[in-house]
């Protein structure tokens, strides 16, 4: 398809700045769009990039090869569609959106223009998550019957330099809430276990955090193959926690972020094995690997690991969970895509 020379990053927050730095590191010329004048000044000073207040101005001026969408969730689809119509390949930060409106139309534009897309899924590039996926592909613990997946951290710690109450996570009008924010867990669970066909959930604003959105969610989902998966998601835990525990008929896999290790038990050998995180690994490595994967796909024309269709399925599960929490009923994610 061609080599990427110029990128337009839309959104100058923390993740937009991370992607800007990584693209520069990879030799890509970057410009940034952000509506806030103070943010544009900071970006120009700190990162030496050209900035624009309006997306249309950035598209017209830079004629970018790719657009990296890092705005609040509510605006992803509109911005991505405008960039796609201008011929940009799309990197869209997770979640794809906070609603189904416009998703089918965006996918149609991307298909018609033969564009490459990636919905941000950096955990798929984490060495331990990749190891677990490989173990499951190799059927090391036999048929999977159940899994418990958990993530939690304290929302104000996400925004140490700003008021968390004004963040997209805290605001309904920007598409926030713990289920959408923690959609990484849904994404890698689908990668591990296949599609979920039934979802049930409870969620609420349980803590003293001053937010409009749900800060705790418990989700129970079942795949088409019968695997039952339990998710716990929260904005409340003061110490960062991320883990999964997978139960197979012939063994068990355990992982937690803090342990920096995957362990698995093989029953027929009555033995525990382990895989340690590489000692020189840093958190930014998975973001660099993710971007390199996207740029490689743009060059070769091969589909990415999580194109819009994949992000659409993640979103359907998340929205099914929100609907179930509201209605008290089981919800099929597939019905939300119809």
Image (cartoon, rainbow, N blue to C red):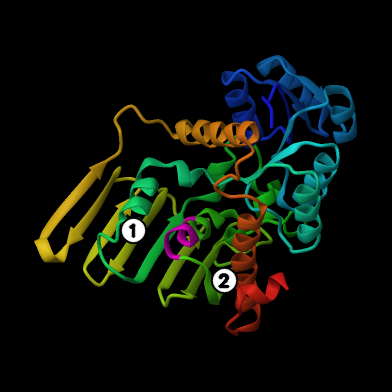
Q: Residue at x 43, y 70 (%)?
A: 230
Residue 136 falls left or right of residue 276: right
Q: Residue at x 81, y 37 (%)?
A: 87
* Image spot of residue 298 (x, y percent): 65, 34
The secondary element bearing badge 2 is classed as: strand
Residue 9 falls left or right of residue 332: right
* Image spot of residue 145 (x, y percent): 34, 74
Q: Nearer the viewer, residue 57 or 224?
A: 224
Q: Residue at x 58, y 62 (%)?
A: 179
Visible in this render: residue 129?
yes
The secondary element bearing badge 1 is classed as: helix
**Marker disc for residue 203:** 2
Q: Is residue 75 above or below residue 298?
A: below
SS majority, magenta: helix
Provide the residue span drawn in magenta.
188-193
State the quadrant of the C terminus: bottom right
* Image spot of residue 258 (x, y percent): 33, 45
Residue annotated with mark 1: 136
Let me know if residue 190 is in the magenta part: yes
């Amino acid at each position: 398809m061609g080599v990427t020379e110029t990128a337009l990053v839309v959104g100058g927050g923390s993740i937009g700045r991370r992607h800007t730095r990584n693209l520069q590191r990879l030799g890509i010329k970057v410009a940034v769009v952000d509506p806030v004048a103070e943010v544009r000044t900071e970006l120009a000073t700190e990162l030496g990039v050209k900035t624009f207040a309006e997306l249309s101005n950035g598209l017209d001026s830079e004629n970018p090869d790719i657009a990296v969408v890092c705005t609040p969730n509510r605006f992803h689809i509109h911005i991505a569609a405008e960039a796609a119509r201008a011929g940009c390949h799309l990197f869209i930060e997770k979640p794809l959106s906070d609603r189904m409106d416009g998703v089918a139309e965006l996918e149609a534009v991307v298909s018609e223009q033969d564009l490459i897309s990636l919905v941000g899924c950096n955990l798929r590039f984490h060495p331990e998550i990749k190891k677990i996926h490989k173990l499951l592909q190799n059927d090391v613990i036999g048929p999977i019957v159940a899994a418990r997946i958990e993530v939690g951290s304290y929302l104000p710690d996400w925004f140490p330099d700003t008021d968390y109450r004004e963040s997209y996570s805290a605001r309904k009008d920007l598409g926030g809430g713990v289920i959408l924010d923690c959609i990484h867990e849904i994404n890698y669970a689908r990668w591990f276990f296949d599609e979920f066909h039934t979802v049930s959930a409870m969620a609420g604003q349980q803590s003293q955090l001053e937010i409009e959105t749900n800060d705790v969610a418990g989700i129970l989902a079942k795949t088409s193959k019968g695997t039952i998966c339990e998710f716990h998601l929260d904005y409340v835990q003061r110490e960062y926690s991320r883990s999964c525990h997978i139960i197979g008929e012939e063994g068990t896999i355990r992982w937690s972020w803090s342990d920096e290790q995957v362990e698995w038990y093989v029953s027929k050998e009555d033995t525990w094995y382990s895989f340690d995180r590489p000692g020189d690994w840093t958190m930014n490595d998975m973001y660099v690997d993710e971007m390199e994967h996207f740029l490689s796909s743009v060059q070769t024309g091969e589909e990415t690991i999580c194109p819009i269709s994949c992000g659409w399925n993640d979103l359907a599960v998340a929205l099914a969970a929100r609907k179930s929490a509201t209605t008290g009923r089981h919800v099929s994610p597939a019905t939300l895509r119809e």
